[in-house]
Image: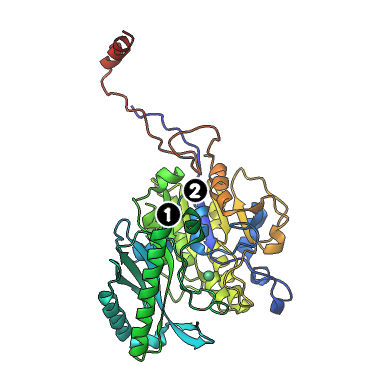
């Protein structure tokens, strides 16, 4: 006889993330944002059919990277982030050794001004001719380096980027040497993090060892590249990472997860979290940079008998367009995304899906800022979601929506709640508090044969003697 358990009426969740979607009012657009100027009939339709609000991932003013906001949006705010260098490497097929500290290492062009090194550019296709030489020099220096029991190795990620692995170090608690904000900061000295300084003891000793080793390694690599007469001479480190035990999205969040991805970072995220991974490469013909194909993949997943409960669909297009600092480019990227998202309109008519569209951070398309903490609109359409009066998808319209202002940590609980599997506060079906009512808690291991129940436990008698 077929079991009548588990009984389920919960719904799948699709979270579409338009990377870097939010923006600031643009002078060149008369104070509107690219999203507000873009023609977005599909997103406006979703806004009219659902509830709207603004997504401020870590609170007003906090600019964030994509990986950090994704980690929290997925429902993992309490879990230590393993580091982006690791995610990128795993996404490229790397198998990180457990417990080995690693960093993202990049080669930049620099110029010494007033006693500090200013970063003036990164490696591009125009440097393909020196890539081989640069790689060889870096390899040679890496093999040569052995100081205070510490050695390094490098693994290539892509042109001018590597993963730098440290052997003989324990701590990754040091600051970045990569300025990230090249227009303001120079090439920087790695120093122990403040929390290590406060903690003192062995933690500080190990962090100081790491800082000293990185300083020696980076200065030596710089000297080697200068001596070779190369145009690219400044090695920079960021994204400290350390590989831990394998993770399970099902255990951590409570449901089966899938990601429709297109880049190493997101492939790495899916692999690291034990999520199903569907990689849909970017094609030149697709103006939405692959989003149409990814949306179709997500729709196919929804139709599978063993469909995932949570599906993440991502596009980098609005963020990349924002980084060009041309608002028109971002308008075009958003319009292409809108055309791709239109495929969901028919699906939501069936009333068996929770769909959310938002961004992971704002990418101002004017000025010098890379990312900003400005609000990004979020729309959520679900059969039991109360609608609001918002009729268009945009930064200003979203302010009057029913969802108000959401943090990244609110998103997974909100969506799983609408999917009829909210985590019940005060109930502990397992060790951890999850973002969703878990689908597979650990069952009591009842013996398969019945008679054992008829035997009165002897332990009770013996202990009461
Ligand atoms: Zn960006």
Q: Position of residue 153 (x, y in %)?
A: 29, 70
* Residue at the disc numbered 1: 201
Q: Nearer the viewer, residue 232 or 356?
A: 232
Spot the residue most to the top. Answer: 465
**Residue identifier under label 2:** 78
* Residue 36 appears in the figure: yes
For mark 1, give the secondary structure: helix
| Mark linked to residue 430 | none
Q: Position of residue 13 (x, y in %)?
A: 51, 49
Q: Residues within 10 Å of mark 1 (few under 14, many from 20)?
A: few
Image coordinates for residue 157, horizontal then vertical, percent: 35, 72
- Neighbor class of circle 2 (other Cα within 10 Å; few <14, some 14-19, many 20+) is few
Residue at x-position 41% and y-position 45%: 250
Query: Does residue 426 appear left or right of residue 393 in this picture?
Result: left
In the displayed orientation, state which residue is furthest to the front. 201
Against 168, residue 226 (above or below) is: below
Is 165 rendered above or below residue 285?
above
| Residue at 64%, 60% in the rendered image | 377
Q: Nearer the viewer, residue 416 or 385?
A: 416
Res. 85 visible in picture:
no
Q: Residue at x 46, y 69 (%)?
A: 176
Q: Secondary structure at mark 2?
A: loop
């Amino acid at each position: 006889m077929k079991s009548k358990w588990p009984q389920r009426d919960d719904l799948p969740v699709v979270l579409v993330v338009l990377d870097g979607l939010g923006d600031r009012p643009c002078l060149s657009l008369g104070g509107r944002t690219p999203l507000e100027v873009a023609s977005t009939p599909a997103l406006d339709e979703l806004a009219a059919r659902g509830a709207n609000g603004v997504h401020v991932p870590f609170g007003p003013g906090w600019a964030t990277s994509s990986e950090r906001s994704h980690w929290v949006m997925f429902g993992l705010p309490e879990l230590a982030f393993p580091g982006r260098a690791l995610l990128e490497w795993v996404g490229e097929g790397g198998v990180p050794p457990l417990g080995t500290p690693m960093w993202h290492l990049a080669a930049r062009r620099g110029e010494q001004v007033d006693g500090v090194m200013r970063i003036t550019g990164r490696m591009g296709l125009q440097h393909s001719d020196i890539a081989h030489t640069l790689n060889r020099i870096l390899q040679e220096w890496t093999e040569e380096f052995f100081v205070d029991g510490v050695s390094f190795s490098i693994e290539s990620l892509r042109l001018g980027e590597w993963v730098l692995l440290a052997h003989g170090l324990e701590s990754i608690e040091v600051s970045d040497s990569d300025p990230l904000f090249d227009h303001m900061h120079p090439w920087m000295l790695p120093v122990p993090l403040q929390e290590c300084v406060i903690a003192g003891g062995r933690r500080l000793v190990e962090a100081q060892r790491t800082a000293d080793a990185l300083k020696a390694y980076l200065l030596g690599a710089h000297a080697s590249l200068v001596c070779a007469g190369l145009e690219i001479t400044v090695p920079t480190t960021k994204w400290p990472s350390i590989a831990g035990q394998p993770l399970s999205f099902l255990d951590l969040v409570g449901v089966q997860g899938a990601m429709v991805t297109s880049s190493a970072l997101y492939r790495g995220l899916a692999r690291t979290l034990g999520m199903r991974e569907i990689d849909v490469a970017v094609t030149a013909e697709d103006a939405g940079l692959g989003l149409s194909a990814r949306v179709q993949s997500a729709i196919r997943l929804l139709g599978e008998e063993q469909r995932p409960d949570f599906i993440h669909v991502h596009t980098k297009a609005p963020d990349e367009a924002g980084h060009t600092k041309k608002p028109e480019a971002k308008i075009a990227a958003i319009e292409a995304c809108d055309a791709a998202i239109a495929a969901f309109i028919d699906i939501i008519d069936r009333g068996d899906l929770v769909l959310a569209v938002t961004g992971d951070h704002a990418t101002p398309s004017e000025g010098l800022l890379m990312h900003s903490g400005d609000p990004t609109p979020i729309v959520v359409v679900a059969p039991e979601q109360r609608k609001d009066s918002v009729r268009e998808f945009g930064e200003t319209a979203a302010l009057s929506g029913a969802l108000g202002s959401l943090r990244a940590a609110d998103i997974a609980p909100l969506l799983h709640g609408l999917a009829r599997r909210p985590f019940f506060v005060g109930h502990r079906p397992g060790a951890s508090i999850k973002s969703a009512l878990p689908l597979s808690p650990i069952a009591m291991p009842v013996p398969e044969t019945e008679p054992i129940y008829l035997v009165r436990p002897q332990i009770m008698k013996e202990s009461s003697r």
